[in-house]
Image: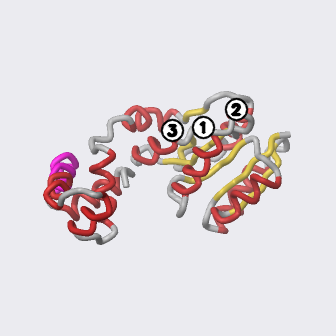
Amino acid sequence: MTSVLLVHAVSLWRASLACLLGQDGSLVIRATDKGGVKAAVAECPPDVVVTDLECPHSMEVLTFMEALRADEEFRPGLVVLARADRTGDLRRAGDAGATGYVDKLGPVGSLGAAVSKVAAGGRHIDESLAFGLLRASEVPLSPRELRVLELAAEGESVTSIASALHLASGTVRNYLAAAIRKTGGRNRLDAIRLSRDFGWL
């Protein structure tokens, strides 16, 4: 039997996905939101963790999975539900060690098969996500530009961003200008919108 921990912030989606996975008799499903992940892992370490990259707090789940990968004795598989046009999300999932990528807009039956394959030590990538995964390594913004743009998206001023990142205000303006140019945005707000659309923020 394969132990699966399903993490989703939305209770209806969580219950629906658990029901779908439960159709496979070889999978034992536990479901929780982000707040219950640590306790669930400590109580019964799962073979595979499943999460939706568009669900609230999914990036925090990926960060937790990265921390788990530092433990040589316990490295659960990671399967993510994703969209091909959200290349930034795909890249982040790859950094967290995902080996299963399921198109959330694709056929329903592929999720259980992906979980089983990852649990057995294999990889699963829906064909519709393959090109997005290739593009995921092509995020045009540097980590520093992304961080500056992220803080700008939170409403921080140039001065407060400079203070938070220990940079000169002029350097922050240069990073913002570079982000606008690289995204093809008309201004800062447009660069933020485009970066979110592509899943970079």
Labels 2 & 1 near each other (Cβ < 8 A): yes
Residue 143 located left or right of residue 108: left
Depth check: 81 or 49 in front? Answer: 49
Q: Identify the residue shown where x is 75% and y is 47%.
A: 4
Q: Secondary structure at mark 1?
A: strand
Quarter occupied by residue 201? bottom left
Residue 143 located left or right of residue 20: left
Q: Could you give the CA–CA distance between mark 2 and mark 1, rounded to whole angstroms?
A: 8 Å
Give the mark toward the camera: 3 or 2: 3
Quarter occupied by residue 96? top right
First-in-chain label (1 vs 3): 3
Q: Amino acid at mark 2?
A: Lys
Q: Which residue is mark 2?
A: 117
From what the image shows, is residue 106 above or below residue 185?
A: above
Give percent across and percent down for residue 83. 47, 47
Residue 155 located left or right of residue 79: left
First-in-chain label (3 vs 2): 3
Q: Secondary structure at mark 3?
A: helix
